[in-house]
Image: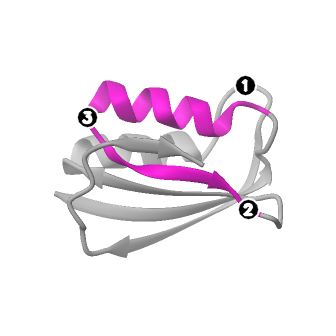
């Protein structure tokens, strides 16, 4: 199990970014959460099998249709045992 925290900068709110992450995480058995930030970014945490987590991180590089990702910050963290994915 691995954990990654991502912050996605650009036009990423109001384009179903968080809901897309929720659907993908559920399909791949990844736990964590996604939330809009006050600065216009989307922040998310992914925990799960390395391949599944990396697929979600890769999705964040472009996002759903309508999104424009200008920058993606990725930080490795210690897993906490999250098994469900929540959208805040």
Question: Which is more N-terminal, label 1 or label 3?
Answer: 3
Q: What element carries label 2?
A: loop
Q: Pointer 3: what residue? A: 29
Q: Is 24 left, or right, of 35 in this rendering? A: left
Residue at 52% x, 39% y is 59
Q: Pointer 2: what residue? A: 37
Question: Which is more N-terminal, label 3 or label 2?
Answer: 3
Quadrant, the N terminus: bottom left
Q: Would you call the spot at circle 1 few (<14 residues within 10 Å), some (14-19), or many (20 or more)?
A: few
The magenta segment? 15-37
Q: How far apart are marks 2 and 1 (CA)?
A: 20 Å
Mark 2 or 1: in front is 2
- Percent x, y of residue 38: 81, 65
Q: Would you call the spot at circle 3 few (<14 residues within 10 Å), some (14-19), or many (20 or more)?
A: some
Q: Is mark 1 on a helix, strand or loop?
A: loop
Is 61 inside the magenta-drawn segment? no
- Percent x, y of residue 67: 77, 37
**76, 30: nearer the viewer:** 30
Q: Is mark 3 on a helix, strand or loop?
A: loop
Residue at 47% x, 51% y is 33
Marks 2/3 in contact by CB < 8 Å: the verdict is no
Q: Pointer 1: what residue? A: 65
Q: How far apart are marks 2 and 3 (CA)?
A: 25 Å
Q: How far apart are marks 3 and 1 (CA)?
A: 23 Å
**75, 35: nearer the viewer:** 35
Q: In the picture, residue 45 is in which quadrant?
A: bottom left
């Amino acid at each position: 199990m691995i954990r990654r925290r991502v912050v996605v900068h650009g036009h990423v709110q109001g384009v179903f970014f968080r809901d897309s992450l929720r659907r993908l995480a559920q399909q791949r058995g990844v736990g964590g959460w996604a939330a809009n930030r006050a600065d216009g970014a989307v922040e998310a945490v992914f925990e799960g099998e390395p391949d599944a987590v990396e697929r979600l991180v890769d999705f964040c590089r472009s996002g759903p249709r309508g999104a424009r990702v200008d920058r993606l910050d990725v930080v490795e963290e210690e897993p906490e045992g999250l098994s469900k994915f929540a959208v805040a």
